[in-house]
Amino acid sequence: MKDEEDKELERIKKLKLKEMIKRVPHATEKHKTSSIIYSKPIDLSDKTFMRFIRDNTMAVIDVWAPWCGPCRLVSPIIEEIARDYAGRIAFGKLNVDQNQRVARQYGIMGIPTLLVFKEGKLVDQIVGAMPKERLEKRIIRHL
């Protein structure tokens, strides 16, 4: 009796696991974004920037500053897109006032600037504030 119950519990666990996997698209596929699923942008620095890009198949970095009005407009949009694409796109935030090396390296002249990386390579640079729909289209075309 105990052996049958154990088998039934194991069968139920496997079914539940399959259902959970279906709800998180791409979470177990080979092209998985990273071992960590980010549902919000991660604060980055000059020191952590390269590792974040290297560790994630697709990464979007929001280069911003606290005094920048358009940056404050874009921030909640980025947070929303990060939630919507958790597990497929990793989002980071880089305060340009505190991390100038990355800004110089990528020739950032205006903020907000979004740097879009795929497999460690810069594939797009989006400058300025724009509505969610336009911003999302620019980002997800690289998926």
Image: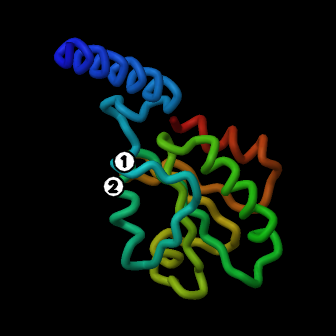
As rendered, which of 129 and 19 lies closer to the eye? 19
Label 2 packing within 10 angstroms: few (<14), some (14-19), many (20+)? some
| Image-based side of 71 in relation to 105, left or right | right
Quadrant holding the N terminus: top left
Q: Which mark is residue 74?
A: none
| Image-based side of 2 in relation to 35, left or right | left
Disc 1 residue type? Ser
Disc 2, SS? helix
Instruction: From the top left corner, tell me how far across and down residue 18 is, in percent.
Output: 40, 21
The single residue placed furthest to the front in the displayed view is: 1
The single residue placed furthest to the bottom in the displayed view is: 98
Between the C-alphas of marks 2 and 1, the distance is 6 Å
Q: Earlier in the sequence, mark 2 or mark 1?
A: 1
Residue at 39%, 18% (x, y): give it: 15
Callout 2–callout 1 Cβ contact below 8 Å: yes
Mark 2 vs mark 1, foreground winner is 1
Query: Is residue 141 placed above or below 130 in the rendered structure?
Result: above
Instruction: From the top left corner, tell me how far across and down residue 33 is, in percent.
Output: 40, 43
The single residue placed furthest to the left in the displayed view is: 3
Label 2 sits on residue: 55
Instruction: From the top left corner, tell me how far across and down residue 143 is, in percent.
Output: 51, 35
Residue at 72%, 64% (x, y): give it: 75
